């Protein structure tokens, strides 16, 4: 038996999925090691968001398996799936903040919904995270009043509120300029080191995204075609990856 630390936090095994007559995944395998950051890169339409939806239990593969800590989550009842989801933090593509709520309310939302913390405890916790993300001064603003980079920082702060074991990031920097993207990656690295969560990031921000990962997996033609250590990806010319992704 592998020891608990060797069991991947997330494992996708032999996944096949056809959507609207199109093969999206065909033999997709991926292991996400506990406490590490795995980055999946793939072109637009490669099936990155759909892959995250299996892990979230929002979509089921046609065949194959999805395991969290070695346990299959396929076919779980909604209450059991909700329990699994409560261990995740999620930063959705484009931040997905609640438009009519302030920054403070957005970040406090999971605490209000899922915990019995007092108003003072919620205030302390939310402000701690807003300070960590360097957006404390924006607490009373609405998402529409924020820059794209600030919105992502709010989304990251919100995703971390319930001390997630696993954080899923769908394109955390799409649409941001290079400098703002770098600042988001700095914050990500800082919080990941501090909190030690397992991270799965999907992105096509090549080569910048290599800075944040431990392992880089390339999703192409419906499967993971290559897994490399991020430090090797950083060292290598990234031309091979670019060629693979536009092919
Ligand atoms: N609910 C759905 N019904 C039908 N087809 C879908 C559905 N969701 C996704 N698809 C298709 O599956 C493929 C993969 O979609 P997905 O959203 O995972 O791509 P992606 O890699 O996340 O792309 P992007 O980088 O643009 O976000 C696309 O061809 C998309 O049109
Ligand atoms: Mg997507």
Image (cartoon, rainbow, N blue to C red):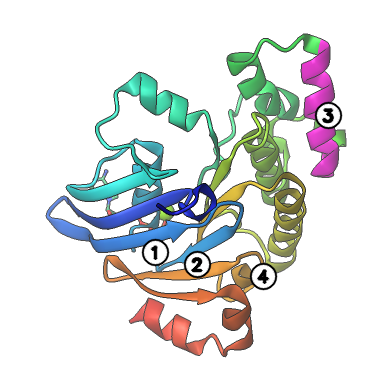
Mark pair 3, 1: CA separation: 36 Å
Q: Secondary structure at mark 3?
A: helix
Residue beneath label 2, please? Answer: 204
Q: Which residues are magenta?
A: 120-135
Q: Is 78 placed left or right of 110 in the picture?
A: left
Residue beneath label 3, please? Answer: 127
Circle 2 Cα neighbour tier, 10 Å, few/some/many (<14 / 14–19 / ≥20): many
Q: How many marks?
A: 4
Q: Secondary structure at mark 1?
A: loop
Q: Is 182 placed left or right of 45 in the picture?
A: right
The dominant secondary structure in magenta is helix
- Image quadrant assignment for residue 238: bottom right
> In the image, what residue occupies the spot 76% across and 59% down?
186
> In the image, what residue occupies the spot 38% across and 81% down?
244
Decide: is 59 above or below 187: above
Residue beneath label 1, please? Answer: 44
The answer to whether mark 4 and mark 2 are in CB contact below 8 A is no
Q: Say whether residue 239 is magenta.
A: no
Q: Residue furthest front?
A: 1
Mark pair 2, 1: CA separation: 8 Å
Nearer-the-camera pick, 4 or 107: 4
Residue 167 in percent (x, y) is at 57, 44
Q: Determine whether the beta carbon of the residue marked 2 sits less than 8 angstroms from the nearest atom of ligand 1.
A: yes
Say whether disc 2 or disc 1 marks the residue closer to the N-terminus.
Answer: 1
Nearer-the-camera pick, 216 or 182: 216
Say whether disc 3 or disc 2 marks the residue closer to the N-terminus.
Answer: 3
Mark pair 4, 1: CA separation: 21 Å
The answer to whether mark 2 and mark 1 are in CB contact below 8 A is yes
Residue 93 in percent (x, y) is at 50, 48
> In the image, what residue occupies the spot 52% across and 28% down?
86
Mark pair 4, 3: CA separation: 28 Å
The answer to whether mark 4 and mark 1 are in CB contact below 8 A is no
């Amino acid at each position: 038996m592998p020891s608990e630390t060797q069991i991947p936090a997330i494992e996708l095994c032999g996944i096949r999925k056809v959507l609207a007559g199109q093969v999206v995944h065909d033999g997709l395998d991926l292991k996400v090691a506990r406490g590490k950051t795995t980055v999946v890169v793939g072109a637009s339409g490669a099936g990155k968001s759909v892959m995250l939806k299996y892990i979230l239990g929002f979509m089921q593969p046609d065949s194959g398996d999805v395991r969290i800590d070695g346990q299959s989550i396929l076919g779980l009842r909604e209450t059991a799936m909700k329990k699994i989801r409560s261990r995740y933090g999620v930063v959705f593509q484009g931040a997905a903040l609640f438009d009519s709520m302030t920054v403070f309310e957005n970040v406090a939302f999971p605490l209000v919904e899922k915990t019995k913390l007092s108003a003072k405890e919620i205030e302390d916790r939310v402000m701690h995270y807003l300070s960590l993300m360097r957006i404390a001064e924006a607490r009373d603003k609405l998402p529409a009043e924020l820059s794209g980079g600030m919105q992502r920082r709010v989304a990251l702060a919100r995703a971390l509120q319930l001390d997630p074991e696993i954080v899923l990031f769908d394109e955390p920097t799409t649409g941001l300029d290079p400098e703002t993207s770098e600042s988001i990656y700095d914050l990500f690295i800082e919080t990941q080191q501090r909190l030690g969560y397992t991270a799965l990031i999907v992105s096509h921000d090549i080569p910048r995204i290599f800075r944040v990962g431990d392992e880089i997996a390339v999703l192409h033609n419906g499967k993971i075609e290559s897994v490399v250590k991020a430090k090797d990806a950083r060292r290598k010319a990234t031309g091979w990856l670019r060629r693979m992704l536009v092919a």
